[in-house]
Structures are given as C-alpha cells and as structure tokens.
Amino acid sequence: MPIRKLSPLLVNQIAAGEVIERPASVVKELIENCLDAGATRIDIAIEEGGLKLIRIADDGHGIPAEELPLALTQHATSKLETAEQLAAIETLGFRGEALASIASVSRLRLSSRTPDNDSGHIIEQAGDEITPPRPAAMAPGTVIEVRDLFFNTPARRKFMRTAATEFGHIADTVNRTAMVHPAVGFTFTHNGRKSIDLPPNDDQRQRCVNILGKELEPALLEFEHHDTRPIENDAEGQPLQPASIWGLAGEPSIARSSSKFQYLCVNGRPVKDRNLAHAVKEAYRGLIAPDKQPVAVVFVELDPTLVDVNVHPTKAEVRFTKPSSVHGLALSQVRQRLLATDLVPDASLKG
Ligand code: ADP
Ligand code: MG
C-alpha cells in the first residue's frame, strides 16, 4: 500500500482513542469547556450510562455562529496562540482536539448562542458529515448533545461496562470537577433522575462537604498554609510565586478501604498524582492501618510555570518542576494538622 495522508475523520478517531476512553472522558472534556467559557451553571444529563446520550448545557460566553464548524475541527482552539502561553497554561483546555475527537466517534449536536445575539445556531456531525449552521431559539450559552458514543468504533464500544458502571465514573468526574469550582452550580441527571445537585457556593469547604457527605463533616480537619519561601527562582533569578495549600484531612476514624475519597487538585485541576497521593498517605503513617486510605481533599496552588499539564492528552497527570517541594508541603501540612488534634485512632489499628 502506498503512503498516504489519513483522512481528517480517521485522524480524529485515532486521537479519540487516547482522549475519549469512556463516557466519563466525554463529560470531563465538555465540562472543562463550560468552565473555560465562564459558565456559572452546568447541567449534565445522561441516558444509559452516557452511551445513549450525554447532554451538557451551560450559560457561558458561547460560540459565534461562523466559528461553530471550526470548534469541531482538530487543532482548533480559542485558548492558545503562542509557545509562551503553553509554558503557563491557565485554561483547562488548550489542545483543541476534544470536540473533534468526540464528534468523530458519536453523533454530535452543538448549539450555541453568544450573549450579543438574539438567536443561537446549531450544527450537527455524524461521521464526516457536518451540517451548515442553522438558527435555533435558545438561551445564551452552549448545549452539546453526544449520542451513540462509539457507534462507529465497535472495538471501543465492546470495552464499555454496564450503564451502572459508566454512570459511576461520570458521577465521580462531575464531583471531582465541581469540587474545584464551588462558585459554579452543577446538576447531574441519569435517565431522568437527579443524582447530583450542587448549588453555587462561595464557600470552598461547604462545597467539599456537599460532595463528601454531611455525615463526614465533623471528622474533617481543615488546613491551610501559604509558603513564604519561593520553590524556585525564574531564569532572571527572581523568586517565583510561593506555593499554597488548602485542604481537609479526614480523621483516621473515617479512613476507607479505597482512595476514592481522596481529591487531589493542582491549580484548579483535579489530578491523579502519585507523588501527592504518597505525601498524603505518609502523613497518616502510624495513624491508620497500612491497607487503609485516608479521606482527604488537597488543593495545591503554585506558579503555572512550575507545573506541566501537557503530559498526557487527558491532562489527568501533571509534572512538577520540584516534586519534592510539593511532596514536603503536603506531607508536613496534613501531618501537622492531624497531630494538632486529639484523634480517635482508627479502630482497626492495633498495637
Ligand atoms: P480546547 O478546549 O482545547 O480549546 P475543544 O475541542 O474542547 O478544544 O473546543 C474547541 C473550541 O470550541 C474551544 O477552544 C472553544 O473556543 C469552543 N468551545 C467548546 N465548548 C465550548 C463551550 N461550552 N462554550 C464556549 N465555547 C466552547
Ligand atoms: Mg476543551
């Protein structure tokens, strides 16, 4: 076979293989777009674990009609222009590939209205067919509907678990994202039943409690620390903005058998980070049984030039310039908070 260029649809489907693992990945990407658009409300509705339908509506700044087709095109973004910006990413998205990837493996409808417009516009894509924008009555903001996910990629479709399992992953994604954005209201409905309802809240702690469960509230120890020593100096030798940390450490008595109740966030982004998870676990050394996992919320803020979020297409992992400083900060702050309290030891911890 001679070498030839892949069609845009195939390119997007290959990219989707990396970014869109399951319905929860679609929800994550779409919610991030709502947040980048300055939404104050995000309503998520799914059917059959998201495999039949994912519908996300926001009240953000919308997309002008003439840009709608571009929004579904790979490597098209309104968030990044220069390499300097890539070195200090401040939006959740920047790769310009989520919508193109999702549209390549589903039947997608994108409706949007900018606040200065009396009407919105809709475009639809199935396979490589995109309809031209047509006007539609709607409130300002954006609504995206994703139907029949993976209908044209049977190999991926086969890997999907039951609707209940996919629903669980989506609920977790919604909660993890909502935790870092307390000022934004979130609702999440599955097959017409509301399962998450988080009113906008200016209190970070309250948002965490709403997600973790009111019954845990008395056992959550709050900590906060602003490091005054800069982690590093920039190229000119000027000290960079010092790191700060805020969080809730669950008392040892509420430790769990899994790490599902650990919420780690860096610069407003929920992350999976072994280094940070290790620091949290270390802070509980001797206080919980080794096979138990603490309940913990840990938010770290540091200069964006000291974290690389462009490590993996899903952006769930980050790379720190100084991982040991971040580890040390988390370990010392959680540990100090735990030791400053008369703790009820974990019942399963003997000796
Ligand atoms: P990225 O988020 O990396 O820019 P996406 O493929 O997720 O790439 O989105 C492409 C573009 O579509 C965004 O840069 C943005 O301009 C626009 N967009 C997507 N979703 C929304 C939304 N909910 N509200 C406003 N604009 C949006
Ligand atoms: Mg995006």
Image (cartoon, helix red, strand yellow):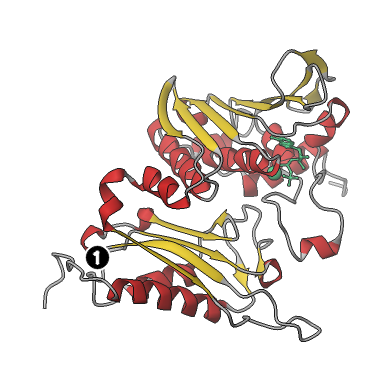
For the view shown, which residue lies furthest in the bottom direction?
237
Q: Amino acid at mark 1?
A: Pro
**Residue 216 image offset from top left, x and y in percent:** 28, 50
Q: Residues within 10 Å of mark 1 (few under 14, many from 20)?
A: many
Q: Which residue is mark 1?
A: 252
Q: Is residue 125 above or below residue 286?
A: above
The residue that appears at 18% across and 66% down in the rendered structure is 346
Q: Quadrant of residue 33?
A: top right
**Residue 88 image offset from top left, x and y in percent:** 74, 64
Q: Is residue 181 left or right of residue 215?
A: right
| Residue 260 visible (yes or no) | yes
The residue that appears at 80% across and 17% down in the rendered structure is 118
Foreground: 276 or 258? Answer: 276
For the view shown, which residue lies furthest in the left direction?
351
Q: Is residue 242 above or below residue 298?
A: below
| Residue 256 visible (yes or no) | no
The residue that appears at 60% across and 60% down in the rendered structure is 267
Q: Is residue 257 left or right of residue 211?
A: left
**Residue 82 image offset from top left, x and y in percent:** 87, 59
